[in-house]
Image (cartoon, rainbow, N blue to C red):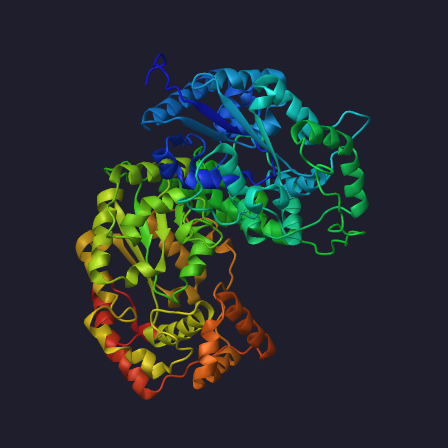
Amino acid sequence: MSRNATPVRVDRIVLHIGTEKTGTSSIQHFLSNNRAELAAEGVVYPRFTGLNGGSQWGVVAAVQGRPWKTEIGARLGIRNKGGADTYRQRLLEAFDQELLACPGCHTLILSSEHFHSRLIGPARLHALKKLLSRWSDNVQVVVYFRRQDRVAISHYSTKLKTGQAEPRVFSAIAGDLLPYYYDYERIYANWSRVFGEKALHAGIFAPKHLAGGDLLTDFCDRIGIAEEGKSRPAKINESLSETGVQLLLELNRQWPKEPLKGVNPSRELLAASIGREHRGRNVPATRAQAQAFYAHFAPGNARLAKKAFPALVGPLFDEGFSDYPEVLAPRDTDLSAEVRRRIRGWRAASVAEQKLGVTRRLLSALQLLGGAAARIKLLAARAGRWRMRPLKVSTTGLPPVFLHMGLPKTATTTLQETLFGQHPGICYLGKRNGWMAKKHCASEEVYRALRPILWRCWAPTNVVQAHSVLQAYSQAQGPEKPILGSWEALLIKPPVEFQYILREAQNVLGDVHVIATLRNPLKRLPSAYLHALRDCARHGKHHTIPKNRAFIPLDKWLAGPSWWRLTNDTRFDFGKNLRFAVEFLGRDKVGIFLLEDMIEDREAFFASILDFMGVDNAGVELFEDRHLNPALTAAELEFLQTIEASEDERKRWFELSNRERRLSLKDVAKKGDGDKCKIVLSDAQRALIEARSRELNRWLVDTFDLDLARHGYPL
């Protein structure tokens, strides 16, 4: 679209400005997840800088005076005035295109908490109004207010995540001049002066003041869109636990952030991983400190209540402070060594991420790693050779795509959490347990793009849309990175469905590869049996356990129902899928990796997978090692056998909710001795497993030259 193209006019613009720490992420994820449903109703929530549920801070950058001097500008790649002008034009054209693509569009929604925190003067608000007038002169400004001390407590976690080394919990206040960020009376006055008081739709961020006691319900009601028929995002918890606070304080001290030099991806990923691993609650201030801080704003809040909430009886916010401690507990744990270890790992891993010369960055790490200098020089040479290889780009414009299809109980979760989701050289689509989108994808949009390919094969695939979403995600993560998705259930799909998945994946994604992790069936199947019992107990069902059964013996579980032999026995029949993958994609595009190799040498195992993907393995040995799937205990197994012995007990057990069953099992395990359940196979059980798996194992040896005999696989 050219610069002189006529923009699309809409009836109104809904401008959601925050304030910060009032559930803006939940609103943005709701809007992002339901773009298609909203568009069908004539409502557009633009993708530009608002992809994957993110804040549309690009609009803020477009009206800032000197965005190249701000962190937002640095993140958006704005380096100077020319870059700012180019970015603004791109934004205008992108919005025009999205509005043009929505027939009957009448409403444009923009949401960013940065409207509140970054546009603090009338001049910037007038610039924003002028920008928006391109599409409509009718602007409805939606704003929520939250008690100032509670915002400050929540903002403390954000300050740590954004790199502040010693952030204050409460801003210092001298005299009568209040910090604009918390001065709601002044914020309301500024926006009213520019957009008109009738344009402001203010709400109080507290359940008793929200329609239905719910933020999303209140937001939809306030702007006049239907909530029905739209998916709601999972609860987003961005707060840090006390350990998370200490880790980030130490990270910011040891590895300071330099925002105006651009984004350091490895540091960002390390900070994000700490944030995901250590969600919780921390209260870094005493009751007296909170009360003293809030007292500065109480008079202005009272005046704002009369102006913006004339029907409100009582103060603007509740004024209880019982959730604060009288005295702060001391921080006794020294986490400096732990953070130093993590930094070394991520600095080494960053060589695969940076575009400005891998070898140079590795060599600069010599001073940081001291005695490891010789090893770093070797890695530098290997990384330099890796970067000199020609980049394989598929005909679709996407980099190579890898689908990891590990079997159950082959360390799939460990790979997802400690390698795939952490390595800065991989564009990871999911699964990752901390991610809230369906199937634990990187976003709802990624899930929707992959859904007809991987999980709903009967649904038609919108190839253009799926490719567009994945290409945009790839560009945002780094177009040079291979794309990887990991979901263990894919390998045990029925053969017809599995074949469709690979054919459709190749059609949409282009250069597709398969990664499969296997394990000696004599050990994998007993472990899978216990996992199935535990899953059935916790969730009320498992596809390998008969309905309403709390326990079945291993013999019956191995035999399975007779109809499995006629359809798809997920425990043994995955070999058909592996054979098809080799026939369809080619031997060189299928990688088989053994869990036993990971147990022997974890670093070498990870490195072999990364080498198959063409990703540098610098620093791979430093990723955190954790056991991520707790095993069934002997006490829990005995408890399930007791329930199964009584029909009445079994009936009562399955009448409980999933949560009640999980708590019961947790209590049983706590009261037990903690011993993990161990299965010793009988001769008959061993013979059955060997007979069912021997043919596949021989094919694996012939096709992939695997040394299965060394690990005791039945041959």
In the displayed structure, would residue 710 be above or below residue 288?
below
In the image, what residue occupies the spot 74% across and 32% down?
A: 302
231 lies left or right of 401: right
In the displayed structure, would residue 523 be above or below residue 250?
below
Query: Nearest the camera: 3 or 113?
Result: 113
336 lies left or right of 355: right
The answer to whether any part of residue 308 appears in the image is yes
Residue reaching furthest top?
4
**Can you say which quadrant of the picture contains the N terminus?**
top left
Pinpoint residue 62: horizontal percent, then vertical percent.
Answer: 50, 21
Pinpoint residue 280: horizontal percent, then vertical percent.
Answer: 61, 53
Where, by quadrant of the figure, is residue 571 drawn?
A: bottom left
Pinpoint residue 272: horizontal percent, then vertical percent.
Answer: 54, 45
In the displayed structure, would residue 13 be above or below residue 663?
above
Query: Nearest the camera: 354 or 323?
Result: 323
Where, by quadrant of the figure, is residue 646 drawn?
A: bottom left
**Can you say which quadrant of the picture contains the C terminus?**
bottom left
Pinpoint residue 203: horizontal percent, then vertical percent.
Answer: 61, 35
519 lies left or right of 73: left
Residue reaching furthest left?
583
639 lies left or right of 486: right
The answer to whether any part of residue 180 appears in the image is no
Query: Nearest the camera: 189 or 83?
Result: 189
Query: Nearest the camera: 291 or 613?
Result: 291
